[in-house]
Image (cartoon, rainbow, N blue to C red):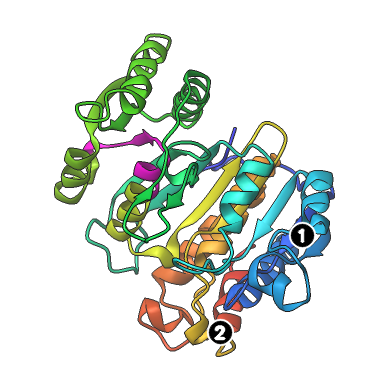
Amino acid sequence: MPATDNTDNHEQPSMSSASLTVIKGDGIGPAIVEAALEVAAALGASFDCEYVQIGQAALDDGADDPLPQTAVDSIRRTGLALKGPTTTPSGTGHASVNVAIRKQFDLYANIRPAVAMTGVEALYPDADLIVVRENESGMYSGQGQSLSDDGTRAEAKSVMTRAQSRRIIRHAFELAHARGRRRVTLAHKANILKTTSGLFLSVGREIAADYDDIEFDDENVDACAMKLVMDPHQFDVIVATNLFGDILSDLCAGLTGGMGLAPGANIGDGCAVFEAVHGSAPDIAGRNIANPTAILLATAMLLDHVQATGQATRLRRAIRAAIAEQDRVTPDLGGNGTTDAFTRAVCERLG
């Protein structure tokens, strides 16, 4: 099962060495990924790392493709990756390498916990949500995009299958069951999108019948967004199609402190990629002020994924303690600390 920001106090022995593909990314990516690797080493988490480049960094290094075959081969070999943010040009330029990786490795489930922390200004300081997003199909997948020769008509296609719906919705229920969550809410727009959203909702109702211990409800996505803003405590786990899940997961991050605290996991049957979901922030690249919290929390999710839950718990506790005590936190968290200094503050609390 994919990991969320759980609070299980059960300590387990350190993990044995695992192979890990490391993608530093663009902008602030290299700095925050190095912070994550430093913290992992301080935890005693042993990884055999393979370093690859994708996106603009790969193109700048002379690659012909933003997702080079060397990167694909490494991820396929290790089945596990830690990824920094990459830049995707808007409107023009190369396609999203994030989408390409998800399709290449069938990473159908995107898991986005949104958990508020003491010491961080948040609209809802005790909110604790998980968004489970279908990662490959629907409008966000970019299928069937075309633009007329005269530039006056644009088209795109949204495709959703029963099989895709079943596996992501069941994934959400299994995650809720494993984490002791009480409710799964399915976000849709079946009143208007009667085929794609209608199919998703129909499958959700079928699967919900298999989980008597978990409450199930559904919401039109616009109503879901409104209710999240008004009172997120009425939600627990939200499962949604690709585009709706992308929007709702960022909304939930905004409710709990912002994208600087937002980790993500992309899970498939034989591969998993963990990442900071915020952007590459080229305006602060090289200034040593980037907040590494999101990639550190993604590292905790990675540790849970490889069954190193004791180390994952220690890492989350250390992050929370450093932020609660405002110890060397970065400017976005109200401090004057650096990336390196905050990383040290976390490492010092790993005992």
What stretch of residues is rendered in magenta?
A: 234-246
On-image quarter of the N terminus: top right
Q: Residue 68 vs residue 1: left or right?
A: right
Q: Nearer the viewer, residue 117 or 3?
A: 3
Q: Amino acid at mark 2?
A: Ala
* Residue positioned 42% across, 58% down in the render: 149
Q: Give the answer, above or below, for where 306 lies relative to 218.
A: below
Helix, strand or loop status at disc 2:
loop
Residue 68, numbered circle: 1
**CA gap, disc 1 and disc 2:** 24 Å
Helix, strand or loop status at disc 1:
loop
User: Would you say residue 239 sits in the magenta stretch?
Assistant: yes
**Residue 332 quadrant:** bottom left
Tally the marks.
2
Residue 335, numbered circle: none
Q: Position of residue 159 (x, y in %)?
A: 45, 31
Q: Residue 214 vs residue 349: left or right?
A: left
Q: Give the answer, above or below, for where 350 lies relative to 115.
A: below
Q: Position of residue 281 (x, y in %)?
A: 49, 77
* Residue positioned 66% across, 51% down in the render: 311
Find disc 2 in the rendering and name its residue: 285
Q: Amino acid at mark 1?
A: Pro
Q: Position of residue 278 (x, y in %)?
A: 47, 65
Looking at this rendering, what residue extends furthest in the front direction?
150
Q: Give the answer, above or below, for where 216 lies relative to 224.
A: above
Q: Can residue 25 be seen in the rendering of this structure?
A: yes
| Of pointers 1 and 2, the one earlier in the residue sequence | 1
* Residue positioned 36% across, 55% down in the render: 250
On-image quarter of the C terminus: bottom right
Q: Give the answer, above or below, for where 133 lies relative to 326.
A: above
Q: Nearer the viewer, residue 142 or 213?
A: 142
